[in-house]
Amino acid sequence: MNSPRVLTALPVFNEAPFVCHVLNQVLRYSEHVLVVDDGSTDGTAELLLQRPDVETLTHPQNRGYGAALISAFQHAIDKHFDILITIDCDGQHEPQRIPQFIQACKGADIVSGSRYLQTFTGDNHPPADRQRINELITSELNDRLSLKLTDAFCGFKAYRVSALRKLDLTEPGYAMPLELWAQAATAGLRIVESPVPLIYLDGSRSFGGALDEAEVRVEYYRLVLDRSIESVEGQVSTSSVRLCSEGT
């Protein structure tokens, strides 16, 4: 049986201090690497021009984290990859875990990293407001979609590309994962969580503008969750939604 064609994609916005180091690590575990540069202005674009070992898609202007991921999804579909790995470029994800996600994706449509499934030596304490909001929105998401997620927002994921073809994602911002979960539940996709360490190198990193205010973020997340669930109302079959946990 042939090995799956795997693409690892990194959404990037102003990550000049990290991008080359992270890419060097990712390339140890993934032959095909895509960077989606979401309108960086800090020299990231110039660094990427010096990297013929990766492919770069560029948004001329910043469109948002969700928009960068959506571009990566479409690229994986267009180029006929079998599995897409997504990993952030800020040092919070460990590229050596890419094979773990590829393996888990052989039995799932979406493998989602969870920082709360397992305790790892050296885990950091997340900023209190971020952990509180993650727990709150994850709980609301589970209640409304009959899911059993422990971490709704981890960016380290693996997707079966055939499953991505069933989704129609449009949310450009940080709440795009909520739209994804609503559509994944509707489609009856098999969802697996896989444990990853809790790494926060810089808890002061900005979401941008008003979203740095915790309650504004909660309001935004709930707005997108409401809109996403309304768009699939009546289509969710709770009996078809499956989730199990890796490594527990």
Image (cartoon, grey):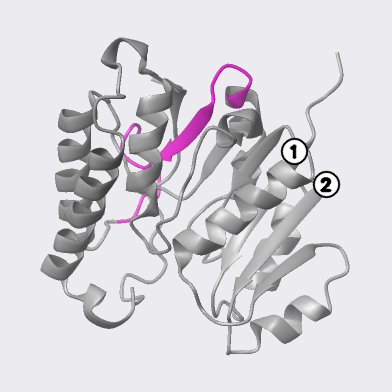
Which residue: 45% across, 36% down? 112
Task: Indicate the position of residue 84 as horizontal and vertical percent values.
Answer: 65, 41
Q: Specify the quadrant of the image occupied by residue 70.
A: bottom right
Disc 2 to disc 1, how far (Cα)? 8 Å
For disc 2, the neighbor class at 10 Å (few under 14, some 14 to 19, many from 20) is few
Let me know if residue 128 is in the magenta part: no
Give the overall secondary structure of the magenta segment: loop
- Relative to 77, is 67 above or below? below
Q: Nearer the viewer, residue 96 or 82?
A: 82
Q: Which residue is mark 2?
A: 31
Give the x, y percent position of residue 85: 62, 43
Q: Which mark is residue 6?
A: 1
Q: Is label 2 in contact with label 1 (beta carbons under 8 Å)?
A: yes
Q: Is residue 80 left or right of residue 197?
A: right
Circle 1 crowding by C-alpha within 10 Å: few under 14, some 14–19, many from 20: many
Select label 2 or label 1 by which is in front: 1
Q: Which residues are magenta?
A: 105-124
Note whether 123 is above or below 151 in the view shown: below
Mark 1 belongs to which amino acid?
A: Val
Mark 2 lies on a secondary structure that is: loop
Q: Earlier in the sequence, mark 2 or mark 1?
A: 1
Give the mark count. Answer: 2
Magenta-colored stretch includes residue 112: yes
